[in-house]
Image (cartoon, helix red, strand yellow):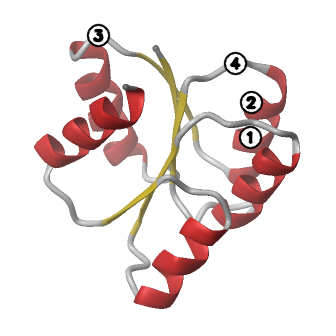
Amino acid sequence: MRVLIAEDDQVLADGLLRSLRSAGFAADHVPSGSQADAALASHEFDLVILDLGLPKMHGLEVLKRLRSRGATMPVLILTAADSVEQRVQGLDAGADDFMAKPFFLQELEARVSALAR
C-alpha cells in the first residue's frame, strides 16, 4: 500500500515516514499543498495523510481537487485545527477520518490500518 503524507512540519513528516515504512507501507512525503495536488494528480496512492495548514494551497483545497477528479482513496486529515466546525468541514469535503495534533502514533497507525482495509 502506498501512502502520501502531505505535511509541512519536516520533523513530524520524518517520524510518520519511519513509522509507516516500518509497518510495511510505501510512504512518500510532500511539504506543500501544491506539491500534494500535483503528486495526487500524477501518481497513484492508496491513502493520503493530509495536513490542512499547508503552504501554497490549503489542505481542504487539495482534498476538494482530489475528489473532483473522482479519486476515491481514503484521506485522513491530520491537523492542529480541531474545532467541530473544522472537523465537519473536512469530512464534508470528502475526508474519511480526522485526527488532531498532537496525537498518539499508535492511534494514527491503527487508523491508517483501518482505512487501508
Q: Position of residue 89 (x, y in %)?
A: 60, 78
Q: Give the residue at mark 3.
A: 24
Mark linked to residue 39: 2
* Quarter residue 23 falls in: top left
Q: Earlier in the sequence, mark 4 or mark 3?
A: 3
Q: Earlier in the sequence, mark 2 or mark 4?
A: 2
Label 2 packing within 10 angstroms: few (<14), some (14-19), many (20+): some
Q: Position of residue 83 (x, y in %)?
A: 41, 88
Q: Secondary structure at mark 1?
A: helix
Image position of 117 with respect to 22: above or below:
below
Label 1 packing within 10 angstroms: few (<14), some (14-19), many (20+): some
Q: How many marks?
A: 4
Residue pictured at 20% horizontal, 59% vertical: 103
- At label 4, the amino acid type is Glu
Mark 3 or mark 1, which is nearer to you? 3
- At label 1, the amino acid type is Gln
* Quarter residue 84 falls in: bottom left
**Front-lying residue, 71 or 34:** 71
Q: Give the residue at mark 4.
A: 44
Q: Position of residue 82 (x, y in %)?
A: 38, 80
| Circles 4, 1 touching at the beta carbon (< 8 Å) | no
